Amino acid sequence: MSDLPILGAAMTLKDVELNRDWLLEKPRDLELQDFVPAEVLCGDWQPLAERAKQLLDGHQGRLGMHGPFMGLNIASADPDVRTLVARRMEQALDVAAALNITQIVIHSPYTTWMHNNLDNWPEQRQRVFEMTHQTLDAAVKRAADQGCVFVLENIEDKDPANRRRLVESFNSRAFALSIDTGHAAYATGSTGAPPVDYFANDAGNLLQHVHLQDADGYADRHWPVGHGSINWRAFFARLAGITSNPRLIIEIRDKSQIKASAAYLANLGLAQ
């Protein structure tokens, strides 16, 4: 039996139908992406959850979901926005409880502009921490109680240490780090961030989730793995030193290329 890490994928239920044989052939982790829109979380999502239970009968991997993010900022300076974001997180936790989901992906508040301005105003760094805690403290506590973990994904992040320190400030087993390889590649190529593998090195054992997608350093491509310029050998070499068993989730635009992306990494001897 191979000791190589087992790849999973991010999919909607429609995509699961197309890739179900691959998903069930090994204990592959799955990240459901049906519950991102506010219209879904605020509506009757129970039929969708029941469909998920049917499709995932026999699934032996870990189950996660992408949480809400569109139009949301977990470190908003507006208290009404923070209240709204907190409510969306509670709604995501309701879905997680219904489906025994153990991981929810949410987005980092750090922007390119913030990187150059965090030290331009006194206490700005601390303000980001304070506003994020006001938004997420209750949700993180509830997540811990129900056996779920929020993972904070890099978006525009230029310095991965900022996101790590934010997660560390919660001191909770229910809050950890996520790396999106394509987002990191964009930041490397377009804003001067360190290479993608450096993001993994900084995260260390706080890393519990990875979005695997290829890119060219110019945009958030979500290309199949192998179609861009990311150094996958370097990235997986960093992962090899991490013992937190992060979920390795292929997140690409063309879901018909999930198997090909997995095969590419398998042919490099990096994963299965």
Image (spheres, rainbow, N blue to C red):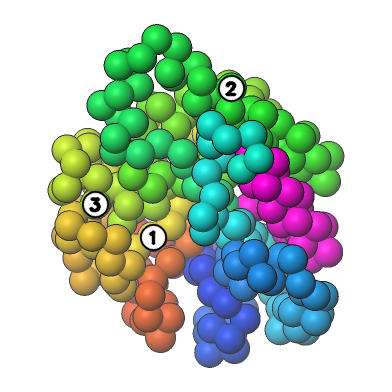
Q: Which of marks 3 and 2 is nearer the N terminus?
A: 2
The local crowd at label 2, few if under 14, some if 14 to 19, many if 20 or more residues have their Cα within 10 Å, is some
Which residue is located at x 67 percent, y 47 percent?
A: 84
Mark 3 vs mark 2, foreground winner is 2
Q: Give the range drawn in magenta.
A: 82-104
What amino acid is found at the position of numbered circle 1 in the picture?
A: Leu
The main secondary structure of the magenta stretch is helix
Left or right, 119 with reference to 228: right
The alpha-carbon separation of the residues under discs 2 and 1 comes to 31 Å
Mark 1 vs mark 3, foreground winner is 3
> Which residue, given by chain and number where applicable, does mark 3 sit on?
186
Left or right, 161 with reference to 235: right
* Residue 205 sits above or below residue 246 on the image: above
Near-viewer residue (189 or 258): 189
Residue 212 marker: 1
Near-viewer residue (212 or 165): 165
Near-viewer residue (5 or 211): 211
| Tag 2–tag 1 contact (CB < 8 Å) | no
What amino acid is found at the position of numbered circle 3 in the picture?
A: Tyr
Which residue is located at x 47 percent, y 41 percent?
A: 108
The local crowd at label 1, few if under 14, some if 14 to 19, many if 20 or more residues have their Cα within 10 Å, is many
Q: Position of residue 59 (x, y in %)?
A: 69, 74
Label 3's element?
Answer: helix
Q: Position of residue 152 (x, y in %)?
A: 52, 42
122 within the magenta span: no
95 within the magenta span: yes
Mark 2 vs mark 1, foreground winner is 2
What amino acid is found at the position of numbered circle 2 in the picture?
A: Glu
Residue 130 marker: 2
The alpha-carbon separation of the residues under discs 1 and 3 comes to 13 Å
